[in-house]
Structure formats: C-alpha cells, structure tokens
Amino acid sequence: MTTVQETTTAPAKGTRFTSAAANYLDERTSISGITKELGRKIFPDHWSFMLGEVALYSFIAILLSGTFLTFFFEPTMTQVHYDGSYVPLKGIQMSAAYASTLDISFDIRGGLLMRQVHHWAALLFVAAIGLHMLRVFFNGSFRKPRELNWVIGFTLFILAMAEGFTGYSLPDDLLSGNGLRIIDGMVKGIPVIGTWTSYLLFGGEFPGEVIVPRLYSLHILLVPAILVAALGLHLLLMVINKHTQYAGPGRTNENVVGVPIMPNFAAKAGGFFFVVFGVIVLISSFFTINPIWNYGPYDPSPISAGTQPDWYIGFLDGALRLVPPGLEFVLWGHTWSFNILLPMIVVGIFIVAVVLYPFLEAWITGDKREHHITERPRNAPTRTAIGAAGVTFYAVLWAAAASDILATHFHLTIEAVTHSLQALLILGPIIAYFVAKRSCLALQKKDREIALHGYESGRMIRLPGGQYHEVHKELTDYERWRLVDYLDYKPLMVRPDAQGRISPMQRVRAAFSRWFFEDRISPATRAELESGKEHH
Amino acid sequence: MRTHSSTDARRRQTGRRHPLASIALITIGLLSTGGAYALLTTTASAETTTATQQSISEGQKIFAANCATCHGMSAAGTEHGPSLYGVGAASVDFQMGTGRMPLAYQGPQGAQKPPQFTQQQIDDVAAYIASLAPGPGIPDQKWLSGNADTALGGELFRVNCAMCHNVAGAGGALTEGKFAPSLKGVEARHIYEAMVTGPQNMPVFNDTNLTPQDKADIISYLKFLDENASVGGFDLGSLGPVSEGLFIWIFGLGAIVGVTIWITARPN
C-alpha cells in the first residue's frame, strides 16, 4: 500500500483526506475486512430480487414516520372532551389516545401526512413481504442452505402482522375497538384459560382502561426490537448464504453473477430507497387511509357496516366469517366455541405448514445438496402446485373478509357469497393444485420441445417430392441454457437399511416422494440435444 | 284510626282523602300526559300542507294508473304489494321522490333510480294517500337546514345508523340480497322521511325514539360529510380497509414492481 502511495505523484487533496480518514477508521475498527466482503457482495439483476428491499425500505419509512407520531400520541385511555378543529366531534367524550390522534390529524403541522405515511407504508411493508415470500417459495430459494432464513423471514412476516394489528388498535376509534372486541372474543373462545387470559390482557372486563398503553408498549418497544433483531439476522444470513440466481450461461451453483454492491448497486439501491419512499409519500398525500375522524370514539355498543381489519389480518377475519354455524356446545360444564376454535386451528395448521415447508420438502426429496440456482416454478411442478393451492386457500379466506363488500358491490346476496366461498375454500385449492401442476408439465414439455427442435418459424417450404415442411428456428446456445439447466429428480426407492429391514417411515417417505416426482419431464440431455441438432 | 270520631272520619273522606281521589288523579294524569303527547306527536301530521280536493283526485288518477297493479285500486294492498293506509305523505314522497317506486322489478329491495314523476305529481299522490288515513306528513323545512349540532348528530348516527349504513354513510350489506344504501348526496328531506317511515328494510325511528331535533342533527352530520371534502385526500369510497388493501396491492405495490423492473432492465 505504502509503495503505491509513494509512487503516486501528489494525490488530490480530497483523496488524501479520504484515505487518511479510511486509514484512521480501519486502524481502530478493522472495518476494511467487512467493507471488502460487503462491498463485493453480488446482487443478481432481476427485478424479483428487489422485493425484499421494498419491504426493508418501507420499514424504514415506518420507523421514521412512527417516531414522529410518538412525539404527539398520548397512549392513555383517560376520558377527555375533544376540543380540537374537527367540528363534528367537538365536545364529544373520548379517550386521550383518540383525542391526540385527532390532534395529529387536524392540529399538528404535517401530522396527517405522517399518519398516512405510517399507515400506507405499513400496508406496503406487509404486502412486499408477502410478494417476496411468494418469490422465494416458487423459486425454491428456501432450499438448503436457506431453510433457516425462510423461518426467520416468516417470523418477520408474523411480527409485521403483530405490529400492524397493535398499531391499528392504538387510536381507540370505533374501528380499532371493534377489532379488539373480535380479539377479545377469540381469546375468550379458548377453553379453560380464555376468560382468564382476556381479563389479564384487558386488565378487567373489556375494554377496560389499560389495553391502549399496553399495546403501545408492544407496538413501539418490544415488537419492533424483536423485528429489527430478526431483520438483522435475516440480512446477515443473506450475506453469508449469498443470493440465489436464475439459471443462465456462466451461472453455476458455485458463483453469483450480478453487480457488486460497491459502487453501482449501492447507488441504484440508494436511489431505489428514495423511489419507494417517494411512492409512499405520494400515495399518502393523495389518498386517505383510516379516516379515524369518521369512525368516532370507541364505545362498545355501536358497530359499523364494513368493519374490516387491515388487509394482512383479513385472512383471519375471513376464517371467522366462513365458519359454519352450530359448532358451539356445552360439555363438562364448559362452553366449547368451536366456531372460534376451528378457524384458529385451521389457520394455525396452515401457518405451521408454511413455516415448516422447507424441511418437509427436504425430507421428501431426500436432497442434501446446496442449491444456489433458483428453480423456475415450472421445473418443480408439485411444489408449484402446492404453492398455488396454498395461495388459493389464503386468497379465499382473504376474500371472505370482504364478503359484505363483495355482496353490495356485485349485487349478490351475502349468503350466496359466504356459501360460495365456503365451497371454494375446500374446492379452490384442489382445483388450483391440478391446474398448476398440469400447466407446469405442459410448459416443461413446450420448453423441451423448443430446446430440442427450436421455434416454429412460420416459414413453410415445399420439398421436391411435394411434401410441405415448416422450418424450425434453432435456439442459440445462450437461449437454450435457460431451458435445459435444471435438476432432474426421481422418486426415492425403498431400500433396506443395514439390518436388511425397511422401516414404515421409509415407506411413507417413498410414497411422498413418488407423489412429488412421479409426473415429471426430464431436461433434454446432451445426447438428445446433439441428435436434435442433426435433425435440422 | 278507630279512636277518631265518626264526623272526623267523614270529613277525612272528602277532598284528597276521598276514595275516588286516586282514580281521579290517575285520570287527570293520564289525560294531561296523553293530551300533551298527542299535541306533540301530531306536529308531524300537522306539518302536512292542507291538500286541495283537486290535488287528491289528481293523485288518485296517477295512483290508479301506476300503483294500483300492486297496491290495489283502493290502496288496500294485494299479494304483490302492501296496503298504503297510514303510510302517510312522507312515505310516498320518499319512495317516489327517490325513484324507488314504481318498482323496476320485484326483488329483495327496490333500487334507487331517477324519479319517474314530477314533484307536482308526487305531491298529488302523497295528498291522495294522506287523505285515506292519517300518517307521517312531509317534514317541516326547519329540520332540514343542516345547521344543527353535527357532533351530536354524528354520535346518534354511529349509535343508530352506522351498523347498516357504515360510519361514513357508504352503505353496507344486509341478509338475502338486501342492503343499506349509501347516504351520499341523499336529500335532507328524504333522509328525514326515511327515518320517520322506515322504508323497505329500514326500521322506523319515530319521534320518541329520535326527536325531530335528533333527526335534524343526524341530517346535519350527513350534510357535513357530503359538503366537506375528505381531508386526507381521495377517500377510496369510504369503504374502510378493504379498498385500502386493494389499493396498496394494485397501485402501491404495482407501481413499485414497475420501478424494480425498470431499474434492473438491461439496455437491449
């Protein structure tokens, strides 16, 4: 290093300062190693790899706007008489939490914008996480070595929902109170401990006077702290595991092709942060969200038509709306509210299945290799089909949360909407499974056909014998790579172990493996490609 | 008591000690409260503009030509439509003034559509129906100005109306295809009439339930919502979190995915 500096003739003043500063820092923190490692982290340039970043940047927007809101929000349920600028609530008795939220909206400069930024960014945050998770799932990017990061990511999703729900409940308006009442009902539906838990949570009979300050502590302290820690871990593991990438020429399981963080990607990503922030602020300036002044202060007696949770809690609300009647009975002197327990159990199983999916799939496939090349969804038909079924299941629950709005806006009866969605909740995933699986296999067949015989060019020629023939256009090697570079799996065979026995577990596993891989289209082999070339 | 002399006892059986005194008191009480009640409650029907005989006969003709198919020639009702005895002028003015009557088709609920008659014709039919039996009349203009207490009106609206009509008056679903319509842009007179008469699936909010002043407050609140633009920007139909969620997924995330594609695009 020093020799280089000596030979350089009089570096510019700015450069001298930067290198001196860098040297000063490095001597005290040994940061250069990390910077070198991080600065050369490679990002593949495909749009779908930026969805996680969108979530990260919306989270930063949430942190900044949320900090502003804490300056003015009063998290107590002390009763006050409103005396702010909003005329239709003047003199109405309400909690200090609601009054201060109204003040943020009407009397504090920039308050309403900040509230809307906070809320819109929260919706975007969870939506971006959702899309990011779908990308990771359908690309098979959760496979070894990234299973743990999938679990951490999913934890982040749950934490984001918890943040959302606690935040939704803070303003103590009619909408948030109705939401809390549902939570109270769900808690009370848990056998034996339910009522006790509800009283513990609300500090007495619902709604009590402590829930807002308690949720506030969770919302601004505990949940964000866990969320930030999990986020750090998520990013750290992403650096350690490196990015996955799509198959392509020059891309192998051992390398990552893309742009290094420094300098270009950092500039792009920095710019992208401002774009995301800009979109959020733009939406917040033009579109109102959660107009709490319309809802009025919380009072356990009124409820509004169209009372819904924010979109990410919708699937839970939908599950409650779809449960058939008559599931509540009294046994051993206790009321068993299966109309509440059943949706909680079903949704719980769904969530656990999503968290454990990487481990389940690894067990079924018996694949212990590391995977750094993402799979195109069509090349893993059974997984894609499972994913499609899961998405359909979630989507039906989600739609059910808006059943009343679907009924009024499409001029349907609410019973018809509910019954159709009940049927769809069962049939939809099954149909989606088969449609997705068949579509994947068909696409694979098409890819194989194209890889072997090229595109149909549309040019017909007539041979001397009078025969007609369509000329096929050969792919370039570059184009073909994408179509043939994927792993071929076969169902596991049942083999006796060292003692010559076949365990029942192995049989189960083999059955699952058969289900997973029995319908498959193998990629075109080299020999097939060669013979295909000779054809033309 | 037995130690008292007989004259004493006789004296005590006159005046307020008379055996019939309590009955008389109850009678007086009932008469005065009943009378006061009658005086107060008749204000609604007293508001009815005295209809001329000409207007009534004109209304009868319109009724016979357009309404009698379902409601019967004498407005006594048929199997297709209810009796209109006692529904009052307010009901006619609401149903015809908002275009709900004549019905477009038999269904769970008559839908709002452009009125099929002029206000003069509607007034005539209202006069005819009001002449058949007493019922709620056209509301007094003083309740409809929209200048009453919006804060109280808002509270009353949330307690009495929001469960069907939504807190922002955006409407909501009821059972079997029925629905509570949106209250945006509904005339003050029609809001008042709807509360008094309880059209279609709506309950009646009579004057003891919500006094005319309460109704005026509710109308003022709804007019406030109508006349004051949503402070936070476009209100996305005031439908609450459903439209917000749909918006962020389609336009918010949609725009951002567009940007990601643009950023990662390689020049071809």
Image: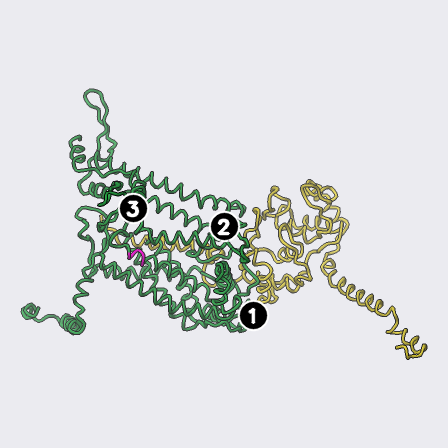
Question: Where residue A84 appears, x then y in whole percent?
Answer: 51, 72
Q: Circle 2 sits in a helix, a strand or a loop, which is it?
A: loop
Q: Earlier in the sequence, mark 1 or mark 2?
A: 1
Which span of residues is magenta-colored?
A148-152
Q: Circle 1 sits in a helix, a strand or a loop, which is it?
A: loop
Which kind of residue does numbered mark 1 sit on?
Answer: Ile
Q: Chain of mark 3?
A: A
- Please name the residue that numbered disc 2 is placed on: A323
Vertically, is A493 above or below B35?
A: above
- Please name the residue that numbered disc 3 is placed on: A364
Query: Pointers 1 and 2 in contact (CB under 8 A)?
Result: no
- Labels 1 and 2 share a subunit: yes
Q: Nearer the viewer, mark 1 or mark 2?
A: 2
Name which residue lies at 29% across and 54% down: B260
Question: Where residue B113 appears, x then y in whole percent?
Answer: 58, 47
Q: Which chain does green denote in the image? A: A
Q: Chain of mark 1?
A: A
- Labels 2 and 3 share a subunit: yes
- Please name the residue that numbered disc 1 is placed on: A92
Which kind of residue does numbered mark 3 sit on?
Answer: Ile
